[in-house]
Image (cartoon, grey):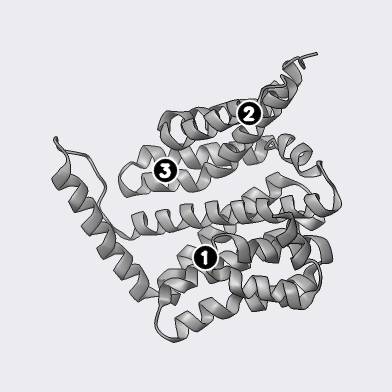
Amino acid sequence: MRALAEFIMRGRTQAAAVALIGHWIPLVSPAAVALVTLRRGMADGLLILLWALLPPIGYMVVGQTSAVLALIGAICVYLVAILLRTKATWPHALMGLVACNTLGVLLLVKLAPNFISDMMELGKVLLDSVREQASQPLALPESDLTLVLGWLAALGTLSCILSLLLGRWWQALLYNPGGFGEEFRALRLPPLASTVCLLAVAYCYWQAGSMSVWVWVFAQPLLFAGIALVHSVAKQRSLAVHWLVLFYCALLLVQPLKILLVVVAFSDTWLDFRGRVKAKP
């Protein structure tokens, strides 16, 4: 990873090549855009962004409208990388990515209506298949516009957050060793952002049906704040790496753990758990 980051920062030609070819490798292209923007500023970042947009634009020209998701994601990462470079706070960045991706998927209804229709049909097929294979009736939502847009926004936001994290890690790896870990472990949402996220999550949850999918759009800032809290406590208590590996395995497999992290992250806004945990000698 360090070698790739060094190659990107070697010059504009190298960065453009990675942004172009990285379209076919998950996270690499938008992460390259983020790295250049964070380190060199808006103008250089915009140049690399244009190279990153060439593959999705090419796919859209030949009729593969699903490439619009990659286009929206790269633009969102670029815009929020500028914000992160200016404000240097992760809460602003996380909230910005949620807002950008939500706006982006809402624009898809106008920009790529055929793609949305295809996704609704695909969702219907998948949900019907799950219902048929279930041993007992399941209360699954219908594959409507709200459900499809919610899934696209959730996946798009997650992809953008991971890309921005990767770009920031590359930047620290080259120019500020150890800085990324300190910055990420300090991530905690301020009261206003935390409250807005929780209210949005609660509203979507209580609406039920297809609207409940939007919970995983608005919960992501709190979810990543919860992950940062776990890393901070692990650092303070000098826990071995395998405990973090087990944590991530559980996070992927155990759904209630995600909900618990969201609640803990919201509580941390007011109670500051980091300050209450005593460092292990």
For marks 2 and 3, give the CA distance.
Answer: 26 Å
Q: Residues within 10 Å of mark 1 (few under 14, many from 20)?
A: many
Q: Is residue 42 left or right of residue 22?
A: right
Q: Is 216 or 171 nearer to us in this picture?
A: 171
Residue 10 makes an appearance in the image: yes
User: Which amino acid type is shown beneath numbered disc 1?
Assistant: Gly
Whether the residues at callouts 1 and 2 have beta carbons within 8 Å, the answer is no
Residue at the spot of label 3: 204
In the rendered image, which quarter contains the C terminus? top right
Secondary structure under tag 3 reads helix
Where is residue 244, by image quadrant?
top right
Q: Against 235, is 173 above or below?
A: below
Q: Residue at x 43, y 29 (%)?
A: 256
Secondary structure under tag 1 reads helix
Residue at the spot of label 1: 104
Q: Residue at x 81, y 67 (%)?
A: 41
Residue at the spot of label 2: 230
Q: Is 155 or 267 nearer to us in this picture?
A: 155
First of labels 1, 2 by sequence position: 1
Q: Residues within 10 Å of mark 3 (few under 14, many from 20)?
A: many
User: Which amino acid type is shown beneath numbered disc 3?
Assistant: Cys
Q: Residue at x 78, y 37 (%)?
A: 182
Where is residue 17, by image quadrant?
bottom right
For marks 1 and 2, give the CA distance.
Answer: 31 Å
User: Which amino acid type is shown beneath numbered disc 2?
Assistant: Val
Whether the residues at callouts 1 and 3 have beta carbons within 8 Å, the answer is no
